[in-house]
Image: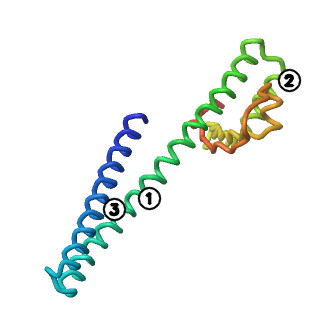
Amino acid sequence: MLEERNRLEGERAVYLSQVAQLDSQLARLVQLYTAGLFQMEEIAAQKGQLDAARTSCQKEIERLDAILVGMSSLAERVDELSVLVRAIRAKVEAGLSEETKRTIIDLLDVEVLITTEGDTKYADVTCHLVLDKARLLVAGVEDLNAATTGTRSGTRSSAGP
């Protein structure tokens, strides 16, 4: 992820450099016009091309900024999940009472769909990891901002008849 972030920041720097060059060229066009070296029609055509190139670069910078912001929030979510996993792991290492098992299941918001095909039973397990204050307090995590982190489906398992 760090490599991707560095690549995107490098790409963003290239676009920023291009914008600076285009701004410099636009300023030079104004100087040439004011010096009377070019007619308005010649300057207008070149300015239109430079403006279009600058707008294109700005759009790419905005696109990259949005991706980079998303990467930041992803890093924050990873930190939040790490805290939650440590809390759950501590409960597991302390021993799994029925209450603790129920707490973990509640934290993961587990859904199990059992289907049969012939004599074979299949279990589709889906976990929705939701970080809300109530669930985190139950897990023993007291200082964490609430956020929904998404869904991850488990693998399909089969059981004998």
Q: Earlier in the sequence, mark 3 or mark 2?
A: 3
- Label 1 neighbourhood size at 10 Å, few (<14), some (14-19), many (20+)? few
SS at mark 3 in the image: helix
Task: Look at mark 2 in the image and give the residue it sits on.
Answer: 99
Label 3 – label 1 distance at C-alpha: 9 Å
Amino acid, disc 1: Glu
SS at mark 2 in the image: helix
Task: Look at mark 1 in the image and give the residue it sits on.
Answer: 62
Label 3 – label 2 distance at C-alpha: 57 Å
Q: Residue at x 38, y 40 (%)?
A: 4
Task: Look at mark 3 in the image and give the residue it sits on.
Answer: 57
To which quarter of the image does residue 50 belong?
Answer: bottom left
Q: Residue at x 32, y 66 (%)?
A: 54
Amino acid, disc 3: Cys
Q: Residue at x 17, y 83 (%)?
A: 42
Amino acid, disc 2: Glu
Q: Nearer the viewer, residue 137 or 114?
A: 137
